[in-house]
Image (cartoon, helix red, strand yellow):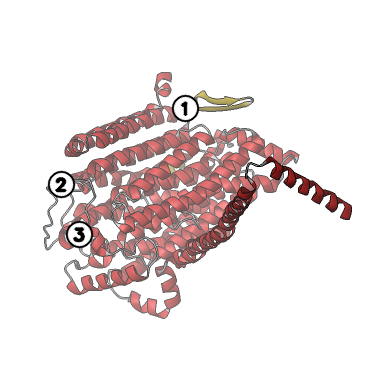
């Protein structure tokens, strides 16, 4: 069994090797490599498939009870300082390896159909492989330094993939926004790591947590300083997992191709934040103020994302705010101490959210056959409707994902979300009430999305609606700040240096069509865990919690979930299902049966409607406070630089010039003249000293 663990480093290395070889090929033989599209994709997919097989083998070994395995080597040393690198395979890392590799594998298969005619097809596969490798390296990292290295690699890959269509201004703006926003959180993470090492002299998760708690208990370190270090570390997950107030980058990240949206939202970028909270749980759990901060941040983010999603018309941005909200549930669970529940929801969410995003990509692919490649039309739900008739596989799988995220039993989301709500109620009923209400909002906006997209009459050929959307987008282009304010003419630009595949014709049909098998097969596969995987974490036989539990807990503690009485389960589960059914009913009355007019409601509460529609004005606030504020500061610094610093330098030059010009007349080569100057100088000094 040990050889299986000794070579676990191959899991991140395999996709890294694929990305490196394809990338070198693109650099050296660009045109030739771009012609070998299928060969490159098969090569990349085969490597991630091999990594996935290896990940399942490790997961099964851990599930069978194998002890956690750590392999390390000394990477740097100076005096008493020692820094090790290596990898760790334990229940948490083995679970994350399976989640990342399975989602990445299916996304890469899907990519072949979605990006079939894109000129950057091969480059996109190289980026996907590098992104997957970075996340896999992150989850097996044994200490904070190695985590930080892969953390930054994940951020770099997200920058490349969000801005994949870099020749579009909206995509270029979005990747910069994601990069800058994450730099804020990552700077806090770096300061927290350094502060933690300064106080504990360790980068190891469990060791640093134990030492920090001992130091606070003995008084050698103040509780305030310990809490400050922990919250600085938490800033990293706040940015990566799009938690308030660093959430603003995630919706704009939808400017990237849909496959990367699915990978970011399901298994890589945003999952990294929740994973780091789990890894740092030994540090966080001993500091109550930090746990409360984490819990309330997650709770508010869950509500914030849901409240914005209800007015979104872009199908991908609606799903993006949904991800932000669901991540809030996970972070809240971690904050209230429901370690296993948070990770359980991370797992179930990965599969149904990947399916939902890939389903949205399938819808967009079908819509483009009718309305063209302009996302103003292809992604707006007001141009859709009735697609179930044309795209039955996509519609069925999307409905399964919608039921799962709404928490309808027996779908996966019910079991994980119900466990989070139950754990939250035991700790803080007010927080539970907010999360419970958010569950109802989630059901409303998700079924609004489903009904608007797949039910009713198809609106894609409605010329009046098309013109309305075009006018609206042009108006936004003149007023909006940041990504999303695009000039539609930019969408026709081609990538420089990449040849368009000859199969990319611009024919339009009068009806949408189902996506090819390379796109629908991943949807059908993901539908299975979306329906069934929640059964591993039922309250009466919680296999998940037996396998994944907080590091400080005894194994027996994991069995406590099984002690929940039938009455408690029925009350809590009934409440969560009941609020979801209310949300579904309202969505049905508004968007399926049209008994209630949503626009009439919006007119009655215009302030709340505008607040949601404008995303709580966070972009505008940040624009005024930080973007324009930093520009004003830069102008003031420029004034100081030009008038004070440059003035001092120019004055020094002028003084040097004048003194040089004056002194040159004293250099005549006559010794008598030099003696006279010396005599006058000495006389002047004598007179001056006599006067004073």
Is residue 465 shown left or right of residue 268?
left
- Percent across and percent down for residue 431 are 55, 59
Proximity of marks 2 and 3: CB atoms separated by less than 8 Å: no
Please tell me whether mark 1 sits on a helix, a strand or a loop: loop
- Percent across and percent down for residue 192 are 59, 43
Dot 1 surroundings within 10 Å: few (below 14), some, or many (20 or more)?
A: few
Report, in whole angstroms, how far the alpha carbon at label 1 lies from the one at label 2.
Answer: 51 Å
- Res 226 visible: yes
Which labelled disc corresponds to residue 612? none
Dot 2 surroundings within 10 Å: few (below 14), some, or many (20 or more)?
A: some
- Res 241 visible: no
Mark closer to the observer (2, 3): 2
Is residue 19 shown left or right of residue 501?
right
Q: What residue does disc 1 label? A: 65
Quarter location, residue 398: bottom left
Lower sequence index among marks 1 and 3: 1
Mark closer to the observer (1, 3): 3
Mark closer to the observer (1, 2): 2
Dot 3 surroundings within 10 Å: few (below 14), some, or many (20 or more)?
A: many
Lower sequence index among marks 2 and 3: 3
Report, in whole angstroms, how far the alpha carbon at label 2 lies from the one at label 3.
Answer: 20 Å
Please tell me whether mark 2 sits on a helix, a strand or a loop: loop
- Percent across and percent down for residue 597 are 32, 76
- Which residue is pictured at 38% across the width and 48% down the height? 159
Please tell me whether mark 3 sits on a helix, a strand or a loop: helix
Q: What residue does disc 3 label? A: 367
Which labelled disc corresponds to residue 501? 2
Lower sequence index among marks 1 and 2: 1
- Which residue is pictured at 35% across the width and 28% down the height? 54
């Amino acid at each position: 069994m040990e050889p299986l663990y000794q070579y676990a480093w191959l899991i991140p290395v395999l996709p890294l090797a694929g990305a490196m070889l394809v990338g070198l090929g693109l650099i050296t033989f660009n045109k030739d490599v771009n012609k070998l599209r299928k060969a490159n994709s098969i090569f990349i997919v085969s490597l991630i498939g091999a990594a996935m097989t290896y990940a399942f083998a490790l997961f099964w070994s851990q599930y069978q009870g194998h002890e956690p395995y750590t392999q390390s080597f000394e990477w740097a040393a100076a005096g008493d300082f020692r820094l090790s690198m290596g990898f760790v395979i334990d229940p948490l890392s083995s679970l994350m390896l399976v989640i990342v590799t399975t989602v990445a594998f299916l996304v890469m298969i899907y990519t072949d159909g979605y990006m079939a005619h894109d000129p950057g097809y091969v480059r996109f596969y190289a980026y996907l492989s590098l992104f997957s490798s970075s996340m896999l390296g992150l989850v097996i990292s044994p200490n904070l330094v190695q985590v930080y290295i892969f953390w930054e690699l994940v951020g770099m890959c997200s920058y490349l993939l969000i801005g994949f269509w870099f020749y579009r201004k909206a995509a270029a703006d979005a990747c910069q926004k994601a990069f800058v926003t994450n730099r804020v959180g990552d700077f806090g993470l770096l300061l927290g790591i350094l502060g933690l090492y300064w106080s504990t002299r360790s980068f190891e998760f469990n060791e640093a947590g134990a030492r920090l708690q001992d130091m606070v208990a003995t008084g050698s370190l103040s509780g305030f300083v310990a809490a400050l270090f922990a919250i600085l570390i938490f800033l990293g997950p706040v940015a990566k997992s799009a938690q308030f107030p660093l959430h603003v980058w995630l919706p704009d990240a939808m400017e990237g191709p849909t496959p990367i949206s699915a990978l970011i939202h399901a298994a890589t970028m945003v999952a990294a934040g929740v994973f780091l909270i789990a890894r740092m749980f030994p540090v966080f759990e001993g500091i109550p103020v930090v746990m409360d901060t984490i819990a309330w941040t997650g709770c508010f983010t869950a509500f914030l994302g849901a409240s914005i999603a209800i007015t979104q018309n872009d199908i991908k941005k609606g799903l993006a705010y949904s991800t932000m909200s669901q991540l809030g549930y996970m972070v809240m669970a971690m904050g209230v101490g429901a370690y296993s529940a948070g990770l359980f929801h991370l797992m179930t969410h990965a599969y149904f959210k990947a399916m939902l995003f890939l389903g949205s990509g399938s819808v967009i692919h079908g819509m483009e056959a009718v309305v063209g490649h302009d996302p103003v039309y292809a992604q707006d739900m007001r141009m859709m409707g009735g697609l179930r008739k044309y795209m039955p596989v996509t519609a069925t799988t999307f409905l399964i994902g919608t039921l799962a995220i709404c928490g309808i039993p027996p779908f996966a989301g019910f079991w994980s979300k119900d466990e989070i709500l139950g754990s939250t109620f035991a700790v803080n009923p007010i927080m539970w009430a907010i999360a419970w209400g958010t569950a109802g909002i989630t059901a409303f906006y998700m079924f609004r999305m489903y009904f608007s997209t797949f039910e009713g009459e198809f609106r894609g050929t409605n010329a009046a609606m098309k013109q309305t959307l075009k006018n609206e987008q042009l108006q936004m282009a003149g007023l909006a700040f940041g990504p999303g304010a695009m000039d539609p003419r930019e969408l026709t630009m081609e990538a420089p240096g990449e040849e368009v595949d000859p199969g990319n014709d611009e024919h339009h049909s009068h009806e949408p069509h189902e996506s090819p098998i390379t796109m629908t097969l991943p949807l059908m596969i993901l539908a299975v865990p979306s329906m069934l995987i929640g059964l591993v974490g039922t309250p009466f036989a919680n296999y998940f919690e037996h396998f994944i539990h907080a590091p400080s807990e005894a194994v027996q503690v994991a069995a406590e979930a099984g002690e929940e009485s039938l009455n408690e389960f029925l009350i809590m589960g009934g409440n969560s299902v009941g609020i979801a059914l209310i949300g579904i009913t309202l969505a049905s009355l508004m968007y399926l049966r049209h008994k209630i007019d949503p626009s009439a409601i919006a007119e009655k509460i215009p302030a709340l409607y505008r607040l949601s529609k404008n995303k709580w004005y966070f972009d505008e606030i940040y624009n005024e406070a930080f973007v324009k504020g930093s520009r004003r500061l830069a102008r003031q610094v420029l004034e100081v630089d030009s008038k004070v610093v440059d003035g001092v330098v120019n004055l020094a030059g002028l003084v040097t010039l004048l003194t040089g010009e004056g002194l040159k007349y004293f250099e005549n080569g006559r010794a008598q003249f030099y003696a006279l100057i010396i005599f006058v100088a000495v006389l002047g000094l004598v007179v001056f000293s006599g006067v004073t």
